[in-house]
């Protein structure tokens, strides 16, 4: 399956990318996606090991299972207001 | 029904105020968040707000609904701005009305505290001396759940 990763604010600047398409085996979780990305190369290894993540606009813990076509956003510490 | 929006346009507090208030409400409360000219002893020249816009709208709607339920304040409106803001510009508006003041204060406080905890919005401070930095933020809860006792005490 293939998911769409998105990076915002500090994570976008750290990785130099606003997003990435990632191929994962069936049954992969949020944690698997993060680990896969971090092993892909220097631009993604700068991401924290367990960042906050949202799947399809909802915060999702690392054990959340992913599905084909999911949008997975990496959420830096928030600073609204 | 509470109202929530995320926008890149300048905020007009009167527009939000017009969404609340009723003949049953004896208290109308308006909160504005504005861009200040200093942070940790450094002079600030402006602020850039970035948001995960689609998600931020969902989260802000939920926060507004939670506040309305917890404090029985259906007359509640909140908006958060994104983009480049100058010193003194309004970044967030919360308007709420209620029969008595305690509920309005509680609901307004709840909305602001939850925005700080979990709204996917970030801001970069630009300093007078030239540098710019992302404001150190709050790690949101992994499941996005509200704080058990957020706001000004229990309703």
Image (spheres, coloured by chain):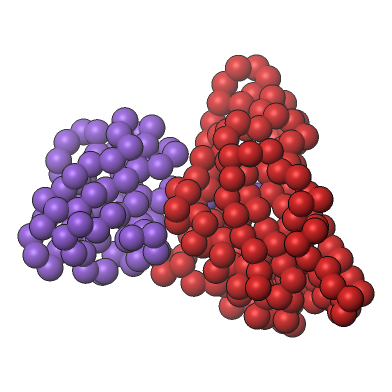
- In the rendered image, residue A52, in percent from the top left (x then y), is placed at 39, 57
- In the rendered image, residue B95, in percent from the top left (x then y), is placed at 77, 60
Height in image: B117 above or below B52?
below
Q: Nearer the viewer, residue B14 or B43?
A: B14
Residue pictured at 51% horizontal, 40% vertical: B50
Q: Nearer the viewer, residue B82 or B135?
A: B82
Chain appearing in red on the rendered image: B
Report the residue that reaches farthest toward the left. Answer: A25
Q: How many marks?
A: 0
Quick check: B8 left or right of B53?
A: right
Residue pictured at 32% horizontal, 46% vertical: A6
Height in image: B12 above or below A32?
above
Residue pictured at 56% horizontal, 65% vertical: B61
Q: Nearer the viewer, residue B24 or A5?
A: B24
- In the rendered image, residue A56, in percent from the top left (x then y), is placed at 33, 60
Quick check: A79 left or right of A44?
A: right
- In the rendered image, residue A8, in percent from the top left (x then y), is placed at 40, 42
Of the chain colours in the picture, the one used for chain A is: purple
For the N terminus of chain A, the quadrant is bottom left
- The answer to whether any part of residue B63 appears in the image is yes
The image quadrant of residue A12 is top left
Height in image: B4 above or below B122?
below
- The answer to whether any part of residue B42 appears in the image is no
Quick check: A64 left or right of B90?
A: left
């Amino acid at each position: 399956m293939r998911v769409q990763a998105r990076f915002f604010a500090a994570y976008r600047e750290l990785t130099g990318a606003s997003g990435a398409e990632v191929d994962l085996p069936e049954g992969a979780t949020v944690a698997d996606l993060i680990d896969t990305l971090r092993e892909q190369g220097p631009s993604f290894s700068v991401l924290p090991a367990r960042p906050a993540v949202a799947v399809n606009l909802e915060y999702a813990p690392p054990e959340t299972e992913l599905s084909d076509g999911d949008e997975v956003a990496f959420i830096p510490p928030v600073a609204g207001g | 029904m509470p109202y929530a929006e995320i926008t890149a346009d300048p905020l007009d507090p009167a527009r939000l105020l017009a969404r609340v208030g009723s003949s049953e409400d004896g208290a109308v409360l308006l909160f504005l968040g504005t861009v200040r000219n200093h942070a940790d002893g450094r002079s600030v020249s402006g602020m850039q707000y970035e948001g995960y816009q689609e998600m931020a709208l969902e989260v802000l709607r939920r926060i507004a609904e939670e506040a309305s339920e917890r404090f029985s304040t259906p007359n509640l409106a909140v908006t958060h701005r994104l983009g480049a803001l100058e010193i003194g510009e309004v970044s967030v508006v919360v308007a709420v009305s209620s029969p008595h003041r305690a509920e309005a204060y509680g609901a307004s406080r709840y909305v602001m505290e939850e925005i700080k905890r979990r709204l996917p919005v970030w801001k970069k401070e630009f300093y007078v001396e030239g540098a710019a930095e992302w404001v150190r933020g709050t790690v949101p809860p992994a499941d996005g759940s509200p704080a058990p006792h957020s706001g000004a005490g229990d309703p």
